[in-house]
Structure formats: structure tokens, C-alpha cells
Image (cartoon, helix red, strand yellow):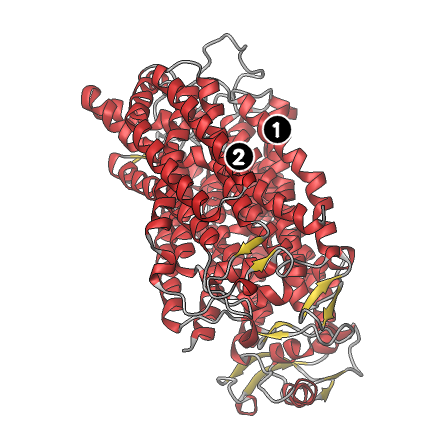
Amino acid sequence: MGLQELWFILVAVLFLGFFVLEGFDFGVGMLMAPLGKMAGRSGGPEADDNHRRAVLNTIGPVWDGNEVWLITAGGAMFAAFPGWYATVFSGLFLPLLVILFSMILRVVAIEWRGKIDDPKWRHWADIGIALGSWIPAILWGTAFAILVRGLPVAENQQVVGLTFSDVVNPYTLLGGLATCGVFLLHGVAFLALKTMGEVRDNALRIGRWLLAPVVVVAGLFGLWTQTLYGKPGSWVAFGIAVLALLGAVALLRAGTRDGWAFTLTTVVVVGVVAMLFIDLYPNLLPSTLNPDWNLTIYNASSNPYTLKVMTWAAAIFAPLVIGYQAWTYWVFRKRISAERIPASIGLPGRTS
Amino acid sequence: MDALDVSRWQFGITTVYHFIFVPLTIGLAPLIAVMQTIWHVTGRSEWYRLTRFFGKLFLINFAIGVATGIVQEFQFGMNWSEYSRFVGDVFGAPLAMEGLAAFFFESTFIGLWIFGWTRLPRIVHLACIWIVAIAVNMSAFFIISANSFMQHPVGATFNPDTGRAELHSILELFTNNTAIWAFLHAVAGAFLTAGTFVAAVCAWWMVRSRRAVADNGGAAVEKVPAPAGMYRPAAVLGCWVALVSAVALIFTGDIQGKLMFHQQPMKMASAESLCHTETDPMFSVLTVGTHNNCDSIVRVIEVPWVLPLLAEGRISGVTLEGVEDLQAQAEENFGPGNYRPNLFVTYWAFRAMIGLLLVPVLFALTALWLTRGGRIPDQRWFSRFALLTIPTPFLANSAGWIFTEMGRQPWVVVPNPDGDQLIRLTVQDGVSNHSVGMVWISLTTLTLTYAVLAVIWFYLLRRYVAVGPQEHDSEPAPPEPPADDDVAPLSFAY
């Protein structure tokens, strides 16, 4: 295996880490408001907020570290395949701008939500968290569907004459719905594992409503992708994802074995991402104009020296990162319940 | 404006904005680590309160630094794709390493620090904030070595087959003299910012606490959460950090200046608005004019000896090249074009950067004098002075970056006079091929979002500073985490 193949795998692994970890962060962010409302219907506004806070605190210590997988994946694309980075990022200018905007909102909304103890303040923060979770959960799926489908790449590696339907079409929209659905389910499995009491019951209840639509949407997207771009390896990945999804469905319906349910939704995310990357290989971005103009791991990569340096950096730091991030999850392994949420320590709303 | 101008405005606005928050993060993390260490060693609970107090301010600031940082990495590809293609082989590596070796550490361990007060043994929890402090400084090193490649490209060769710069030595890239001194200079600026911030906030609280209690006939006042004496040691700490940083800034800045006179003579000539080559020109302190045509400037105040000293460490016998002569040379070497930066901006940004340094230095000296021998100041003018000082290091940081980035125009990668002359790129050749309307959309979206966030950031910092160290932060966390079977409440942050 050459360095270019290795770096294709490493970039895939970084995106894998991002989708597995931020996948449940997005899921938790999307589920926060509905779970609050469910509790608020019977318990009033105080229960509403306590449930929201319990949900948010499940990802509290880890979401920021999870997001760095994306930053590093972006950096690795830049370092290992600058042609890919330049073409995709400039070609998908507006979708990326929307993703950036939503992720900015999410960071500040999560961090600043508890700083002021005031319903109106929290309301705005919750809008930020919702937008910052729903939009990227959909758009990342759309973005990867676009990558697999290809863009009008010219001979000089530039995207030319991009039309609206290159970006928004039934296939890419379905891709967005599929990731959104999978992340929702992944978030449910994470909440089932990390909470107890009413929050957990409600999360599982939402999960049960989601099961059928998610299986349909994700299954259709997988089948559509495989029919058009499938190869033997990606059929294996797709098969594993389907089996894991069915297993997760069974466990989430029963509401038992939370650890296994979460493991299975993780395998679903891994399977889907693996499927997409295997379908791409050895392309990085197919050209819809002429297959000779595809961006591949060979014509868009850095020189061997850079790849070698980066391999050393990854070999030293990646195991370390995985080690201490795993330790973080161990430190905060305890379940959280809305009933035991301490009072907010934010400042009062009005300046007095 | 064409797409290039709009893209440059966007990069300028987003970068200056990002770098309002970053220096405070870089400098404050180590200061908080020091405070927590003092608490850990001495067991004095006022240091615990100070750690928690500044920790909250740190986190408000950290969030916005992270949020605006994502944009930075993405917009190289989005708005400067041709630049990314040309240098990606070199420039991408430090960016990816910044993620691997710095961002992962800081974001994971800040999570452990925020949520770990009652979950981690004290010593492990202390280690977390130190790891954050080291990691934020590491990230500065990686990004500045990437930036320094744009100022002074080393470690790479031009490959005619691929038409791009290709890395041949990562060691040369990381030991680029421009990178090392720019890194130290930027970090010194960050410590100046954070030292001033801590000193000024504590100074303001000292005066406020003492006056409020005095007005109340010496009895406790509800709005004064802690005795004035609590802030004094932290104020002194902040003052010393600011003063040492100021010395480091002058020292590193001087070395950078000498490097730049050689590596980027156009930048230094434009810092002076020096039009024609002169021997021992005067250093200009004040000029009147727009600098658009450099012959139309009226030089009001000038000082001898300074410029030769800055350029070569001698007070006379130094010939400095002027903008017009450098322009002629550049046209000869690189073809027709305008190789002059915007002289008005470079001239004034350079002076603002240096001039603004005086305010925190003066403040730190005043504060050290007023707190000498255990004194606690109560002068109202002093607390006003403290508040007015806080923004000055922030403005100086911005001015410094505006100077160094505007001073390399029209280049995005400045040709290295001692290196591969083919590694050079103008902003015109580096920008993405977008329609001007599309770039306007991103410029408007980001600027408006950032404006709103800046207002909230300022509101939160102001509120949290004005409320002071909170009551629930006065009792330190237990020294050891509760056993696993205990139903231990986590300390929730959200």
C-alpha cells in the first residue's frame, strides 16, 4: 500500500471519528428541545428546562473534543490532498458557508446557554443549538452524497458551471435525510446509555417513533448509492450497516442493553461512512464532465515527503488522542438524570 | 470592489476578529493554571475563588475563539483555493498537526477541567488546565509557522511539473527564523493581554470593594463578594506578567524588525512611508497626509538614529531602500505590477502597535506603585484607568497583525530573497474563482454573525466581571472524587 492509499484511509478514519462522535452530539442537540417539551407537558416549565439541561450535559464534557475530528479531517485533506481540499471547498462554497454558520451558532449556544439564568436567554440559546445540530446533520450527508455523485470538474481541477441541481437533487437530499435520521437514532442510543429515569424513557419513546422512518430513509439511500456506485467491498460495508441497524432497532424497541444498542448505532455510522469512502476510491471527486478529469488520490495528493511527515505525526498523536478521549468518556461514565440536576449557576437575567 | 477585494476584506475581518479572543485564551490559560497551582500548593481558598472567577471569564472567551477558528481553516479552501493548491503541500501539514497536537488536547482537556472539579483527583484536575495552557500555546506555534511560510518561505522547492511549492524539510519550516520570532512575539502579546486583563479586573475590584465597605462604615456590603485584599496578589501577578511581556515584546519585535528589513524590505519601507532610498533616514513619529502618493506627506515629528538602530543595530551608516526604488526592483524581477502595500495602513498600524504598548506598561507600573508594601488602593481615577487599559493590548495585537499582513501585499507568499524565487504568489493569483456576489454573501453573513456574537461576548464578560467572584465558588471542591457507588452529583456547567 502506498502513502496515497494510506492517507485516503486516514482521512476516511478522521471523518469516521467525526461522524461517530459528533453524530451523537448532533443527535443529542436535535433531541434536546423535543425531550424538554415532552417533560414540560406534564411537569411544567421547570421540568422542561431540567430535562433539556440533563440532555445537554450528557455531551457537555466531550462535544468540543469531538468537533476537533472535523478540524483535523479538514487539515488532513489540506495536507495530504490539497487539490481535493481546494476544489471541494471552493466548489461547495455556499453549502459549506451554511455548515460553518450553523456550527458557529452551536458552539456559542452550548457554551453560553447556562451563563444567564433567564428563560428568554435560554430560548435563544436553544434555537442556536437546534439550528447548529439539525443543519449540519442534514448537510454533511448531502455533502458526502455530492462527493460520491461528483461535480462538474474541468481538466484544470476547477469546478465549472456548477448548477443548482448538482448540489440539490433527490439523491443528495435523501443523503441528508439519511445522515440526519441515523444521527437522531445514534443520539437516542447515546441518551439511553447516558441518562436514567424519565429522560431515558422519553428518549427511547422518541427512538421508537423514529425506527421505521430511519430504516426506510437510510436503507433507500444505501441502496440507491450501491446501485449506482457500489462495489464488492462497499456492499459488505452496507450489509454490516443494515444488520447493525436492524439489531439496534430490536434493542431500542426493547429498551434494554443500552451499551450494545449504542455500539450497534456506532457500527451503522461506521458502515455508512466506510461504504461512501469505498465507493469513492480511488477517486476523491469524480468529474461529471469527463472521467479522465476525476480528482483521484494520485493526481490531487501532496508529494511523498509531506505524506511521510504527516504519517509520522499521525502515528505519534492519533493513538494518544484516542487514548485520552476514551479516558474522558470513562471519567464521565455516570448516568445523568433530570431529577438530580442542580440549580443553574448563571447570573440573573436583568442587570440589577 | 471585485471578488479579490471582497475576499480580502472577508479574510481581514474574520482574522482580526478571531484574533481578538485568541490572545486572551493563550495568555489567560497559563495564568489560571498558575492560580490553581498556588491554591493547590498553599491551600488558600482565595486562590480557588480567583481560579473559578477567571476560569468563567476564560470559558466565555474560549467558546467564541473556537467558533471563529473553524471559519479560519475552511476559508483557505473556500476563498483562496488557488493559494491552497499552490502551497497545500507545505501549508496543510502544520494545520493538520495543529489539530492533532494542539486542538485535540485543548478541547478534550478543557472539557475535563470544566466538568471534572468533583470527578477528578485534585492533582489530575490541575494537570488538565496545564495541558490546556500548553496546548493553546502549541497551536499558536503551528499556525504561526504556517503563516511565516507566507512571509518568508523556507523548506520548500518549486516543482515545475506540478506548478506548486513542495515541502522538502519540515524541520526548516518549523525552525524558520521568521516563525520562531513571530511566535514568541505573538505569545508575548497574548501574555501582555491576559496579564493586563487580570491586573485591571483585580485593580477595579480592589478599589470598588474598599470604597463600598468604607462608605458602609466598615461593615460588609452585599454587592462586594470578597474582601479587597483578595485581589491584590492577583493584581500584582498580572502586572508582572504584563511588564515582563512588554520587555519580551520589545526584544522579539526588534529581532523581527531586523529580519524584515532583510526579508521584506518593502514592508519596512512602507512602515516608514520611506519613498526613496536614503542613508540614515529619520524615524517618523507623526505625519500628515493620506500616503497614497508618498511624496505628499508632511513629516511633522522625526527622530534620528532610531531607524538605523531598528534595521541593523547601529545608529548611523545604514542605507534603507525606499518604496519607489523597491517597486522598480520588483517590476524588474517579477514583471509589471504594483508592489506597494497600502502605505497609510502600514504606517499607522505600525505606530499604533508600538504606541498602544505604552498604556498597559504605564498602568502596570502605576498599579505596582499603588499596591507597594501591601497597600490596597482606593483611588477612583485608578479604577477608571484600569478599565480604560483593558482594550489597549487587544488593539495593539490587531494593529500588529494588520501591519504584518497588509505589509506583505500584493503577495500572499512573499518571495524569499535567499530562497527559491519561484515560490511566490500574489493575492490576485491565490483567490478562488468566485463571482463577486457569492463572496459578498459570505462576507455579509460572517460579519453580521460576528457582530452579534461580539455584542453577546462583551455583555457576558462585562456582567461576569461586574458581579465578581461568586458565593458558590468560595468553597473548594472535595480533594478526592467520590467513590463510584456514591450517587455523586456532577458539577454541571450547562
User: Do residues under tags 1 and 2 come within 8 Å of each other at their CB atoms?
Assistant: no
The vertical placement of B128 against B396, above or below, is: above
Name the quadrant containing residue B265. bottom right
Q: Estimate how packed mark 1 is, as few (under 14), some (14 to 19) or many (20 or more) residues with alpha carbons within 10 Å.
A: some
On screen, residue B388 versus residue B121, left or right, reads left
Q: Can residue B20 be seen in this view?
A: yes
The residue under the point 52% across, 71% down is B431
Q: Which chain carries label 2?
A: A
Question: To which residue does mark 2 refer?
Answer: A236
Residue type at mark 2 is: Val
Observer-nearest of A271 and B347: A271
Is any atom of residue B464 visible in this view? no
Which residue occupies the foreground of this view, B68 or A316?
A: A316
Residue B126 is labelled as 1
| B192 sits left or right of B248 in the view | left
Quadrant where the N terminus of chain B is found in the figure: bottom left
Q: Residues within 10 Å of mark 2 (few under 14, many from 20)?
A: some
The residue under the point 46% across, 37% down is A22
Q: Quadrant of residue A169?
A: bottom left
